[in-house]
Image (cartoon, helix red, strand yellow):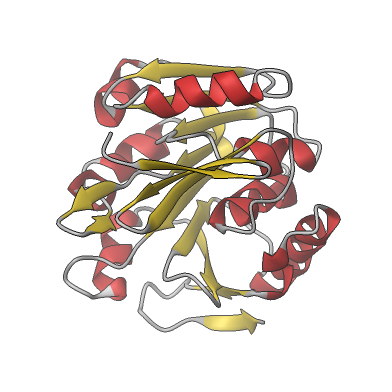
């Protein structure tokens, strides 16, 4: 993987083209990044204990997840295993139940008979001097994700702007069937979290729950997110909670 390892007091950061791919902490705690909110979403929805993590990098999700008290089993997959090796070196003591496989994500899902309570899509690839989502995120992957969800499970997509620049078109490609949809936007990041499930709390209720979990681990993102619903499949959001 073409990334730099940048030391910090609490661990290391994996940086690619100026973008932090993952923060590998030596102990559980906040990263003050998007993965804190992914961890809070897993807790706020409380659907179960089996998580599939598509795109491991350095396992940055695990530090806030464990800090929030989550003892979830995590099945992780990534084409590159170097981040996982570093994660095991630095985080073995507190990592918990984590199972990693080096594989292409779509093929892994096709071979995998398991269903999950939560599936987190956190893939990215380098593109010139930037980091973007792979094409599979918008086309091939979503149907496979939905097939592997438990009936009451949730899918969380960590999205970057589509290459054509249209969020509406990109979101429509991912959504399928009759799902409840919530979108989390960030003050400091261009990412959007797309949360999809059969049933979800209202945007306002979910916002309150996310902030509560984020405050518990002292993540700075507790005051830097907005949660919206997107139930009409248009590019306009409503039920804003800031």
Relative to residue 238, is residue 69 depicted above or below?
above
Q: Position of residue 119 (x, y in %)?
A: 50, 38
Q: Is residue 114 visible?
A: no
Image spot of residue 73 (x, y percent): 64, 23
Q: Residue at x 27, y 30 (%)?
A: 106
* Residue 77 horizontal side relative to residue 239, left or right: left
Relative to the observer, which residue lies in front, 103 or 240? 103
The residue sitting at 32% across, 45% down in the picture is 142
From this view, report whether residue 71 is shown above or below residue 160.
Answer: above
Indicate the position of residue 35 as horizontal and vertical percent values.
57, 50
Q: Nearer the viewer, residue 18 or 154?
A: 18
Q: Quadrant of the N terminus?
A: top left
| 7 or 27: nearer the viewer | 7
Residue 101 in view in this figure: yes
Q: Quadrant of residue 79?
A: top left
Question: The C terminus lies in which quarter of the figure?
Answer: bottom right
What number of labels is visible?
0
Q: Residue at x 68, y 33 (%)?
A: 26
x 49%, y 41%: residue: 120
Q: Quadrant location of residue 5?
A: top left
Relative placement, left or right, of 141 versus 116 is left
Residue sitting at the far right: 216
Q: Residue 181: horizontal and vertical position, in percent? A: 50, 62
């Amino acid at each position: 993987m073409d990334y730099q390892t940048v030391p910090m007091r609490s661990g290391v950061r994996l940086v690619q083209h100026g973008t932090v791919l993952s923060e590998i902490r030596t102990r559980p705690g906040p990263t003050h990044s998007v993965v804190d909110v992914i961890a809070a979403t897993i807790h706020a929805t409380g659907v179960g204990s089996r998580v599939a993590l598509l795109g491991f990098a350095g396992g940055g999700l695990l530090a806030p997840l464990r800090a929030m008290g989550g003892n979830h089993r995590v099945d992780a997959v990534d084409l590159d295993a170097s981040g996982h090796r570093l994660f095991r070196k630095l985080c073995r003591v507190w990592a918990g139940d984590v199972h990693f496989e080096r594989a292409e994500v779509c093929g892994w899902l096709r071979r995998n008979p398991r269903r999950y309570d939560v599936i987190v899509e956190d893939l990215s690839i380098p593109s010139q001097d930037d980091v973007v989502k792979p094409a599979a995120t918008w086309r091939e992957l979503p149907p496979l994700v939905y097939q592997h969800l438990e009936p009451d499970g949730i899918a969380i997509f960590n999205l970057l702007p589509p290459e054509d620049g249209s969020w509406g078109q990109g979101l429509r490609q991912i959504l399928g069937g009759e799902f409840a949809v919530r979108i989390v936007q960030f003050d400091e990041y261009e990412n959007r979290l797309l949360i999809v499930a059969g049933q979800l709390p209202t945007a306002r209720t979910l916002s309150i729950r996310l902030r509560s979990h984020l405050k518990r681990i002292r993540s700075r993102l507790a005051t830097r997110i907005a949660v919206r619903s997107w139930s009409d499949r248009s590019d306009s959001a409503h039920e804003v909670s800031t």
